[in-house]
Image: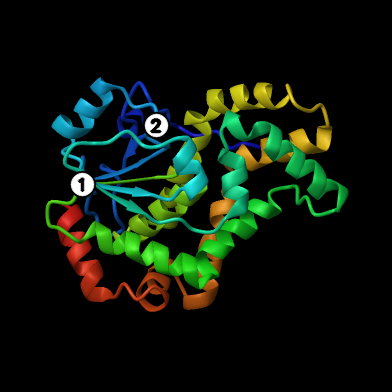
């Protein structure tokens, strides 16, 4: 069952062309520091940004670093709007489940045909196991470790960095990246989980619309249940990633330091930049 959350509206950045753009500013750390506002942002893709949205990101946020976790097909179908003065970085972790969960209308017929084929072969994984496996892969796969280490490096690459990270819907690929950023800054696990679960609130109407679109192509209950499950935002998915980091290194912060190699000096720099 979906957890009920008390949503803090002050984290949401209200743009016309996105539904899940948020400011990490305002979260407290274990040591009592606060993350600065207008420095670290998370979002769904920037394909539908309006000119007024772009003005907000440029004039109000001074956005200068954009990290895109989408694969080449996703970027081709929904290219980000260009933000004047911002540098773009493509960091694409290999997670088919996250891609399936976020695919656009242009892919629906092909996607559903693919899922029907997997189901016939007995390879369609339900009940969030696929999403949990994808999250664990972010933690364990060397290619993903390289990508997310690069994300952390970009956060401290320039002293005036204002970073926005995004994927398609801003849920799992971005959610994991955000978790690493928050842990590196000293935020506790419950706050990390709460931030991840906020996507359930902001993606709710979009997910209902997508399910209506999927029903145009299939009435297969198993396929529809899989698609609904893939778009859902549940605690056990991000918890699986946190648990795997803890299993590998003792804690998420030790994982960041020892497995990703983002050591204490890097973390010190990051906290000096983003905490007050």
Residue depicted at 26% across the width and 59% down the height = 154
Label 1: which secondary element: loop
Expressed as whole percent of the image width and height from the top left, the position of residue 271 reads 21, 61
| Up-down relation of residue 208 to residue 188 (above or below) | above
Residue 269 in the image, given as x and y percentages of width and height: 18, 66
Residue designated by label 2: 47
Q: Residue at x 55, y 56 (%)?
A: 239
Q: Are marks 1 and 2 in contact (CB under 8 Å)?
A: no
What is the number of callouts on the image? 2
Mark sitting earlier along the chain (1/2): 2
- For the residues labelled 1 and 2, the Cα–Cα distance comes to 19 Å
Nearer the observer, disc 1 or disc 2?
Answer: 2
Decide if residue 210 is in sight here.
Answer: yes
* Res 62 quadrant in image: top left
Left or right of residue 65, residue 246 in this image: right
* Colour option used: rainbow
Q: Position of residue 4 (x, y in %)?
A: 55, 33
Q: Residue at x 29, y 55 (%)?
A: 29
| Neighbours of disc 1 within 10 Å: few (<14), some (14-19), many (20+) | many
Q: Which residue is mark 1?
A: 162
**Quadrant assignment for the N terminus:** top right
Q: Which of these two is toward me, 74 or 200?
A: 74
Q: Give the crowd class for mark 2: few <14, some 14-19, many >=20 residues within 10 Å.
A: some
Q: Quadrant of residue 167?
A: top left
């Amino acid at each position: 069952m979906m957890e009920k959350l008390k949503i803090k509206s002050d984290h949401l950045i209200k743009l016309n062309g996105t539904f899940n753009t948020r400011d990490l500013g305002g979260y407290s750390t274990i040591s009592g520091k606060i993350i600065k506002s207008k420095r670290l942002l998370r979002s769904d893709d920037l394909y539908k940004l309006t000119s007024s949205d772009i003005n907000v990101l440029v004039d109000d946020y001074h956005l200068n670093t954009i990290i895109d976790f989408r694969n080449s097909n996703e970027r081709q179908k929904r290219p980000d709007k260009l933000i004047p003065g911002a540098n773009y970085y493509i960091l694409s972790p290999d997670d088919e489940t996250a891609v399936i969960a976020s695919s656009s209308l242009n892919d629906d017929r092909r996607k559903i045909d693919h899922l029907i084929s997997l189901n016939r072969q007995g390879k369609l994984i339900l009940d969030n196991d696929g999403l949990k496996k994808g999250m664990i892969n972010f933690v364990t796969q060397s290619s993903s470790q390289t990508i997310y280490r690069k994300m952390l490096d970009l956060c401290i690459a320039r002293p005036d960095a204002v970073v926005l990270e995004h994927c398609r819907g801003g849920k799992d690929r971005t959610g994991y990246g955000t978790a690493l950023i928050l842990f590196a800054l000293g935020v506790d696990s419950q706050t990390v989980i709460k931030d991840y679960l906020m996507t359930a609130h902001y993606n709710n109407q979009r997910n209902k619309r997508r399910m209506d679109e999927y029903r145009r192509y299939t009435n297969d209950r198993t396929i529809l249940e899989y698609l609904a499950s893939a778009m859902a935002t549940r605690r056990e998915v991000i918890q699986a990633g946190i648990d795997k980091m803890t299993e590998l290194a003792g804690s998420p912060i030790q994982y960041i330091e020892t497995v990703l190699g983002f050591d204490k000096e890097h973390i010190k720099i990051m906290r000096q930049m983003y905490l007050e």
